[in-house]
Image (cartoon, rainbow, N blue to C red):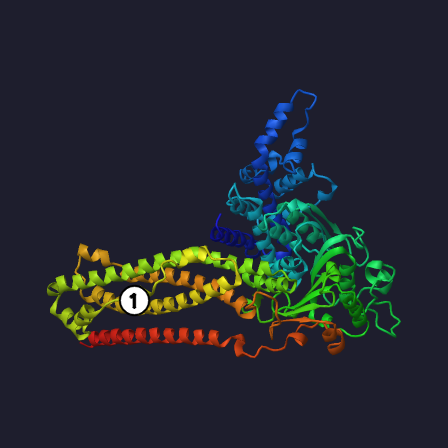
Amino acid sequence: MTNEQLKDLENKLWDSANALRAYGGIKASDYAVPVLGLIFLKYAENKYRQHESKIKADHKEAEGTRMERPIEEIALEVCGFYMPDHARFDYLLSLPGDQSMAKALRDAMEGIEQYQDASFQDVLPKEAYFEIEKKKHDILPQLLKTLSDIPADATGDIFGKIYEYFLGKFAMSEGQKGGEFFTPTSVVRFIVEVIEPYKGRIFDPACGSGGMFVQSATFINQAKKDVSDIYVCGQEYMGETVRLAKMNLLVNNLRGEVTEVNSYETDAYDSYGKFDFVMANPPFNVKSVKESTVKNDQRFYEYGLPKNKGKKDDKIADANYLWISLFATSLNEKGRAGFVMPNSASDARGAQQEIRKKIVDSGIVDCMVSMPSNMFLTVTLPATLWFFDKKKVHTERKDKILFLDARNVYRQIDRAHREWTNEQQQNLAAIVRLYRGENGRYLELIQGYFKKLVPLIERLFQQRYDLDLAQETIKNKLKNYANENQTAVSPAKIKKLKEADFFAKLAAFDCTVEAIHEEFEDELAEDVDHLEPTNKAQIAMTQRMKAYLDIEDKIQACFKKDLIQLTAFWKLADKNLKLKNDKTWGELSRADKQLEVTLQDYTTTKEQVGYWCDNIHWLQERFPEAKYQDVVGLCKMAGASDYVEEQDYSLNAGRYVGVEIEEFNMTEEEFNVLIRDKFNELESLKEESNLIETRISLTLKEIIN
């Protein structure tokens, strides 16, 4: 399934699920779990069908022997669960209309859980379907029918993406409450890129629906490593969200467990010093935790408690530093942590500052990343990503902290929301890797970007040829048609064509792109494909790509200019020169649309080439030696004299990196490119405007006469 097909399927499924709100009057908070339960049911059926022949064969082979076992036991061993017949989609979809679908779904969910161990009991939704059925009897059958459109061969990866998509949609529908169970994917992916949880135990004591765990699995799969090498442990306070997380683990084939507890009160996994990785987006600024709850718990008191001096009440001033302490103390001697905190925590004073000093002096703070505002679905509150690394204390970076100000790095999704694109995540992670001395990985990333260019350059070459040929063909056909048929057209129409100087201009017209053809780089794609993975070779190729794109800019401007002219000629000919029932005109019918589509294909590919070149240029401009260096307005590797003596233990990146001088966050070169593009666009619009004015004038004259 392609990304486009998956996106179409996700949108279709969401529209169907959202009908619960539109027609049934049901809030997202009430239908999120049951809908995700149905997605799990479809996933379970798909997975079971993939193993069913082996399950049946093993059962039949052992039948009547001492090795005979119930088929349910074999299914659990082979597939991880048993799928009874009454839980299958075919059975549910064929249910007579007078029978309760809610009851059938409850029986299906119970049928799957019946053979599971205790950790998976009472996870799947059951009673919620009756509430939906009461609202509108036919909603559940319609929803099941839509979900049956998920292909039978859809893999767990596809279901994982659908599940994640639905979680995000539910979070946006819920507004402020949505953040309780969903952290934006791009934020989680960046955390994963930095801490790199390839192998070991991962802990999230505020795990929500398990998104941190899922992105860890995705990261491992993309690195072509074994996801069974990680074991995840989650703690979550909200019971319904725990169920979402457990389904999420199953859908994404993750080993682990999620426990319903209050992390301030309960340590479900004896977490002190036990985990290889910690990832979390905990609730911000909680002020209701009692000191008596945490004061005797080593997870929280090792660096000190955030208690206001002089106050005798039994309340912690702010739980942010309880979480920070918990993350630090949960790491083993080689552990890494990545988590979200409000910006205020980076500069908090009083007891919180004292805790921060101890943590910083311990040497485990690896890097601090300031995020753009509006990255979260529910709040505009600016946030910071904190990263700890216990191994760092034994390296040359023991007294170094990387401050990365990424507030100007984002893609605007809509008016209220932003995200990091995959490449922005990779580029920011590349800075962290350069800071760690992993320069080879920086070169690998740029080499990967160049590899993305190879098929695009080849496609662009073909599309340029197709567009050139289409324009040349239509030009010649129009000229031939005009020469052969002008005597057959009425005098009135000939007069209008002559008033527009149609015949003379058409005869003199030539496609302007021909003048630039000799500048094409025919071997460019092959040279990029065989590029040497060194910084010198990559920078040289970037310069070639810049020159190549400059030529393509000229070609694109010519194509646009030619298209405007040709379209104008075609429209005049279609109105005044085309003969009724003339079969020869059939070759020219809809020529204007054909040209527009061909130009759009070319333009889209050219933009994609530009996109990858922009990402390469963004990195090379800032790190021309393929080594870490401080970049004003972006990053600073601070030593103890910086963060202790000058900044008094502040961990606010903005205090260290400075301000970028270039207005609008652009270099002079980028600004010149923008102005040139805008100028070319203006010239094209002026030409189009002139042609439109001419057509309006001719039309008005026709009406007057």
Disc 1 crowd, CA 10 A, few/some/many (<14, 14-19, 20+): some
- Is 199 on the left-hand or right-hand side of 683? right
Residue 363 in the image: state x and y as whole percent. Answer: 76, 65
**Amino acid residing under circle 1:** Val
| Mark 1 residue element | helix
Q: What number of labels is visible?
A: 1
Please give left or right for residue 109 compared with residue 623 in the image. right
Residue holding disc 1: 513
**Residue 205 visible in this rendered orientation of the protein:** no
Taking 225 as reference, is 644 above or below it? below
Q: Nearer the viewer, residue 483 or 111?
A: 483
Note whether residue 591 is visible.
Answer: yes
Which is nearer the eye, 194 or 240?
Answer: 194
Vertical side of 60 occupied by 178: above or below: below
Q: Residue at x 33, y 62 (%)?
A: 596
Residue extending furthest top?
Answer: 64
Q: Quadrant of residue 511?
A: bottom left
Position of the C terminus by quadrant: bottom left
Residue at position x 54%, y 66% in the image: 619
Residue that appears at 87% across and 73% down: 311
State the image quarter where residue 329 is shown.
bottom right
Point 73% across, 77% down: residue: 647
Q: Nearer the viewer, residue 110 or 194?
A: 194
Residue 522 location (% of width, % of height): 36, 59
Name the spot of residue 503 as percent of width and height, x first. 17, 70
**Front-lying residue, 77 or 244:** 77
